[in-house]
Structure formats: C-alpha cells, structure tokens
Image (cartoon, helix red, strand yellow):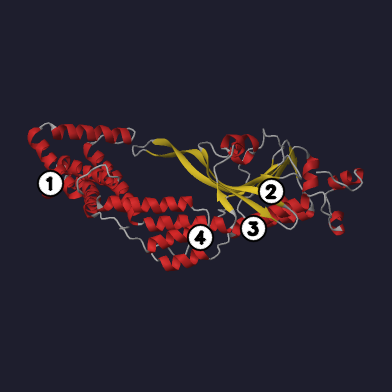
Amino acid sequence: MQHNQKVAQHIAKLRSDVDAATSQDDLLEVITQVKHHPGPLDYRDKITHSVKWLLISACVLCIFFIFMRLWYQQVEPLAKLVIDDSCYWLPVALSTLLASFCHERGWLPVPMVVSFTLLVAAMALVTIYVPEWPEAYWTALRIFGYVISVGEIDNQQFALWFILIITSSITWVWLDYRANWRKHLSDKIFLCDALFNNGLKQTKPAPEDKLDALVKQFAEFRRGSGTRDIEQMFAGQYQGEQHSFNYKLYHFQYTIKRTQTSSDGNGGYKTKTVHEHRDRYGMLLDFPFANGLCLDAEDEVKLKDSVYAEKYQTESNAFNDIYRVQACDKLTAARFLTPAMIETLLDLNRNFISPMVEIAPDGRLCIASTSKLIIEKRKHSLAKPDEFYQEIAGHTELKRVQKLLAAVHELMRLSDNNFVRNPKESVNLNPLTQIKNSENNAHVSL
C-alpha cells in the first residue's frame, strides 16, 4: 500500500472515531491515538505541489502575456510557451492532479512517479501521432469557457486564463485542506466536547423540525427570496429553578436575491442577480404559557398575511422603538407583555442582535437572532497533543447558549400562572390587562 493511501486511511479512522464518540473520554482517546500513532499521518505531495505552483504561475503569466504580446514582440516566445503550448502541458498537469486524487483512494496501483511518467509519455505520443490535437484542444477550451462564463468569454486565450484560475484555486484549497487536517479535526473535537459539556447532542431534524414544517409554523423561517436550509440542529435539556424543558438549537441559512445594475463599458447598463446568504440562530421548544404572538426586533419578516392579525404597542417607548408586536388578539399581547416581561425582552435585545420571539398558535416557541450561539474557539490543536488533551479534559461552557436558556426560563417564569407578581409591578400593568384582570378577579389564564 502506498504512503498517501495509508495516511488517508489513518485519518479516516480518526475522523470516524470522533464521529462515533459519545463522551469526553472518547475524544481524549482520539487525541492519545494521534500522539502515539504508529503509522504515517502526513501526506507526501511534492509532485502535486509542483503542479499547483505551475498552475498558479501560468495563471499570473497568462493574463500578463495576453496583453503584452499585442504590443511587444519580445514577449512572444514566452507567450507561446505559456499560452499556445498549453495544449501540451496543461492536460498533463490536470491529469497528474486526477491521478493524485485516485492514488489516495487506492484506485491506481502504481506509484505516483510512475503515473506522472506515463502521463508525459502519453502526451508525447498524442503530439506525434495526432496532429489535430491542438485544434481540438483550443476548440474544447473555447466552448468550456463560453459555457462556464455564461457567454461572457468567447476568446480562447481568456478561456485558458479562466480555467487556470479555477483549477489553481481548487488545487490550492484541496492541498491546504489535506495538509491541515489536524486543524479541521481539532475543530470538530472541540465542538463535540463543548456539546458534551453543555448536555447537547447534534441531531437530524424531526418531522416537526424540518424546514417545510417550520415555514408553516413560524414566520421566522419565511425570510429571504431564495434558498433556505437548516444547516445544523442540536438537542438538549435545561433544568432551571422553576421550569425544566427540552429544546433544540438550530442554525438557519437563507438567501436574499437582489438585482444589481452596473455599467457594461459601452455607455449602457447591465443587470445581474446577486445572491446574498444570511444566517439566523435560535431555539425551538414547547411553551405552554401563551400562544399566537410575535415580537420582532428586525422588521424583515412580512407579517401582513400571517395569523398575527392584531398590532399592539406597550406603554414603554423604549420597547416600542425596538420591537414590532403582532398577535392573534390584543388581549394575548397585553397579558404577556407585563413590565417585568418588557424589561426581560429589552435585556434580550441588548445581548442578541435582532432578536425575534415567536409563539405559534399551537404553543411552540421559536426565539432567534443573528448572533451566533456557539462562538467559543479552541486554544490548542492536534499539532500539540499534550496541550490539546488538557484543554479538552477541562470544561467548555457555551456562554451565549446558557444566556439564551436563562432568558427562555425567565419568559416561562414571568408567563406562568403560578408565578406571583410583585404587587408594585401589577400597578403598572397595561390598561387592557388591568381591565381583563378585574373581570377575572385578578386571575389571568394563559
């Protein structure tokens, strides 16, 4: 078995061990494996790196020579070598990258050096026995560039430059990812450890948590005008002083499509569609204390045709300046938005960017913002196993997650029928709530 193939198998085994980990001890065992691993864990990519720098150099020189050869005859020999003769060296370079990819997976039994030699020999035979090859190469190149650029590039030389940009960029990213596998695996180990420390487990969305179901249930997920997707979801349980509940954290990504107008260089204008990706992070849980209410601090979601038909404003100007409140009926909003609740929601806005609190008609809560919930970063990595072992053996608290959980617990505490409000607080209730409280003998049913 070849060296790179062994390395790929060893790294794959370490990754599978991390995926299968169910405790912090399992993660520590992976770190120990890396420290004392008997087999090779680093790739040998000398030929592939040489091809990478060849492609990058050709990409830089190509655009330079395309313009310089129009005015200076002196650059013609070098321009011919880089551009015109690319029909000979570029296929070999790309085939070498493909061969390296196949070697890593064990699909080619011969060593990389032998594969490279065979590719050069094959190109030499094509050059000798297929005189039509250059013409076929440039035709294919022009067609490829024209299709990929959606009709923007119809010049053979620019098509070559375009392809060099693509291939050199992909090669750079691929080799960088391979060389830095310890960094990426360290990130995964750190995340898994943080989840274990905070009682969280990555999970696939249940039927009620899939995007189609969430779009029907919550206005929060109707953002954007393009693609939408639930990128990640974690399940956990919170035990508070008065309430305990199961919850799910999620990462929601959506796309906004907008039209961008720019000059076409000929005195006219052209338009193109730009896709802007945005992210929201939040929590889903059952909330049996209220329903049919939406409080939005961003005003991006359209609520005009939603179930929240009634607009509502509190007596707090600070709150009204931040939150847009709509509910199934005003009484629901009045009951919910007590002075203590208003202060809690103002504090939520101070800690999270553009929060949205939405309680669906069926009593399920979605609380979201644009603030990323898991922001903790590791200090060490598998490059230094001893230091990384000590870091993972410790405790990582997800502070924003805990802060959001505390806020949700406070929402429950203030909404619970069994919660006895401070007498001073009841004096300042919204008039609509005071009337309803009087009718119900000061007992509010939520």
Mark 4 residue type: Asp
Q: Return the disc, 1 or 2, that comes first in the chain's sequence.
A: 1
Cα distance in 3D space between marks 3 and 4: 27 Å
x and y, in percent, of residue 372 in the image:
55, 53
Look at label 3 and name its amino acid.
Answer: Lys
The residues tagged by marks 2 and 4 sit, at their Cα atoms, a distance apart of: 45 Å
- Using the image as rendered, state which of residue 395 and residue 32 is in the foreground: 32
What residue is shown at x 79% (from left), y 50% (from top)? 416
Mark found first going from the N terminus, 3 or 4: 4
State which tag comes first along the sequence, 2 or 3.
Answer: 2
Residue 86 in sight in this render: yes
**Residue with the mark numbered 2:** 323
Residue sitting at 57 percent across and 54 percent down? 373
- The residue carrying mark 4 is 25
Q: Are marks 2 and 3 in contact (CB under 8 Å)?
A: no
Q: Real-space Cα distance between discs 1 and 2?
A: 66 Å
Please, is residue 414 above or below residue 216 in the view? below
Q: In which quarter of the image is residue 242?
A: bottom right
> Residue 239, relative to residue 386: is it above or below?
above
Q: Closest to the observer: 279 or 318? A: 279
* Amino acid bearing label 1: Glu
Distance (Cα) linking label 2 and label 3 = 20 Å
